[in-house]
Image (cartoon, rainbow, N blue to C red):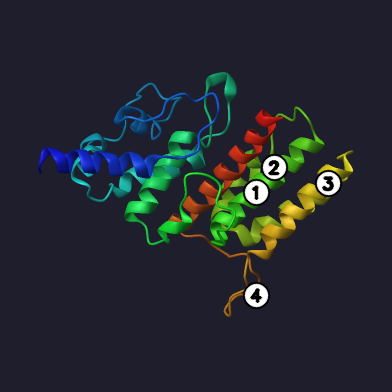
Amino acid sequence: DTFGGILKNLKRHYDEMEIVRPSNDSIEYLGLWRMLQETVNKKSRDKNPVSNMAGAVYRAIISGSRYPNSLYQEVIGRIRADQDNPDNRIYKITRGRAAIIKAYLMRNGTIKKEEITVGLNENCSNPAYVLGREFAVLEAIQEEANPGINATIKDRYFNAACATPAIIFPVLFKLKNSHIRKINSRNKVIYYETLLEDLQGKLLLKDDQKTACPRRLTLEEQGMFILGYYHQTQKRYEKKEDK
């Protein structure tokens, strides 16, 4: 390719990787090494990514071709396998993993590109994205009701909710009812209930469905669920920092 063409492909890659980041994250661009580290098991001795992945990802960046499927699959696999462990700096859903999912879905996926945004997309009615947002709100309610809780619903239910939401979300809403009764602030209760009601209203019932909550989510849809969760969580932290 021409030098200009390579620069254009580089810019496209970093545009697709752009995502809202925590306030303590000062790294504007995630280089190839940092990307690949998101696919690595932090507990293992071998911190190298899957063989040949570096070359395949680098070629995709430089040439503007599709990202290798293995990159997306490894990131989803790590999200399923990892649990939050701040002491060891292990986190289930990181800025890097969310960015890779966003970039992959924009370039390789079949989901409408306008639904995949840098920050929270409050107008998006994609069921998987909405469910991810709902999960983040339900987790926030639990933490509000039980300050300093060690393990949240994310530790126990996230993977199942991401794959088979119709089975898990009724359980989560039952738990929510008990959690919200512990919140002393009337204003906070109204805020959370209104937010959940608004999100539920975005889940439309299709002709072949008994419930608006899908039985299963495809691998692509699971990526949208994770993005919805990540965006809603960052919005919540953003509000805390503003206060």
SS under mark 2: helix
Rendering coords of residue 46 (x, y %): 34, 24
Tell me if label 1 and label 3 are in contact, CB under 8 Å. Answer: no
* Whether residue 189 is visible: yes
Label 2 vs label 1: CA separation? 6 Å
What residue is rendered at 66% in x and 29% in y? Answer: 241
- Return the mark for residue 210: 4
- Residue 39, by quadrant, is top left
Label 1 vs label 4: CA separation? 21 Å
Label 2 vs label 4: CA separation? 26 Å
For label 2, the crowd category at 10 Å Cα-Cα, with few meaning under 14, some 14 to 19 and many 20 or more, is many
N-term-proximal mark, 3 vs 4: 3
Q: Amino acid at mark 1?
A: Phe
SS under mark 1: helix
Mark 2 = which residue? 139
**Quarter in which the C terminus is drawn:** top right
Judging depth in this view, the residue of 127 and 2 nearest the camera is 2
Disc number lying in front (1 or 4): 1
For label 4, the crowd category at 10 Å Cα-Cα, with few meaning under 14, some 14 to 19 and many 20 or more, is few
Mark 1 = which residue? 135
Label 1 vs label 3: CA separation? 16 Å
Q: Amino acid at mark 4?
A: Lys
Disc number lying in front (3 or 4): 3
* Left or right, residue 36 beside residue 202: left
Q: Amino acid at mark 2?
A: Glu
